[in-house]
Amino acid sequence: MRTRPRDEKRMAFLEHLEELRWRILKSLAAVIIASIVAYIFSSHLLNLLIRPVPPDVQLIFTAPAGAFLIRIKISLIFGLLGGVPVLFYQAWKFIFPGLFDSEIKLVSVVVLSGTVCFLLGAAFALFIILPLGLRFLFSFQTAQLMPMPDINNYVGFAGRLFLAFGVVFELPLLSFILSKMGILTPSFLRRQRRYAIVVIFIAAAILTPPDVITQVLLAAPLILLYEISVWISAAVSREQQDKKQDTIEKE
């Protein structure tokens, strides 16, 4: 009699792992399909990616297959960006059984918002941060020291920026979710501001390539996003207090 519940729990656990495996496979399939589509337009994507490079800077490749491998790399980067909606959706479907009814309605909005925030972060990195960073870094060239960066290093540099800014742009959304669930409060965020700034610079050093300028370029908007998160948390807190007050008055 005691072994049967354990067997049932074991089967439920194995089924849970099986579901996780299928969610991961579907996410990978979405990224692969998006990457194949991106490869078709890889020449246009390459031009978009190297547009921030100053016209007097020549990008090079040193391996015979370098140009082909760069197109593959670019396709994977933009395939990952294109697969973000599916990644968020599969994550939502996986955690769906563990949610309450009130949280299910919230997550359906979060999936769309999370996708938009991630893509906005990547676009911010491509059109604003990358040109500013390159303009500053290449300003140190001299007549004896001419920049000829390897295209592989440049694409990797840009890809890490896209990922870093896509992730950090999720901070206000995360603040909204945790505040809605009552886990996070605006007073806590305000008290921890000085520690958060230290953590932000540490995270910027980890997420960005090893130079001070890109770290600062990531840390500055991240601090701004933290302040936006405080404002969002305060707005959610006021809304919940108003609801509680309305409930008390009706009773």
Image (spheres, helix red, strand yellow):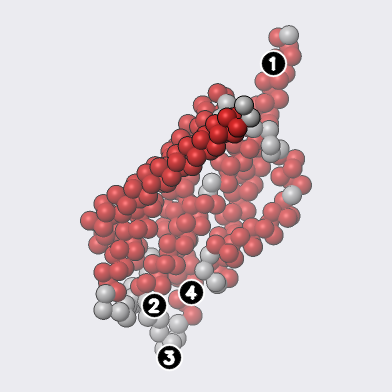
Q: Nearer the viewer's eye, disc 3 or disc 1? A: 1
Q: What residue is disc 4 on? A: 137
Q: Quadrant of residue 196?
A: bottom right
Q: Residue furthest bottom?
A: 144
Residue assigned mark 1 = 246
Identify the residue position indicated by label 2 in the image. Answer: 149
The x and y percentages for residue 7 are 55, 34
The residue wearing badge 3 is 144
Which is in the foreground here, disc 2 or disc 4? 2
Q: Which quadrant: the C terminus?
A: top right
Secondary element at tag 1:
helix
Which three-letter amino acid code belongs to the residue tagged 4?
Answer: Leu
202 versus 242 height, above or below: below
Q: Give the CA distance from mark 3 to mark 1.
A: 72 Å
Distance from label 3 to label 4 (Cα)? 16 Å
Comparing marks 2 and 3, which lies closer to the viewer? 2
The kind of residue tagged 2 is Pro
Label 2 or label 1, whichever comes before in sequence order? 2
Q: Is residue 5 left or right of residue 49?
A: right
Q: Position of residue 223 (x, y in %)?
A: 62, 53
- Residue 174 appears in the figure: yes
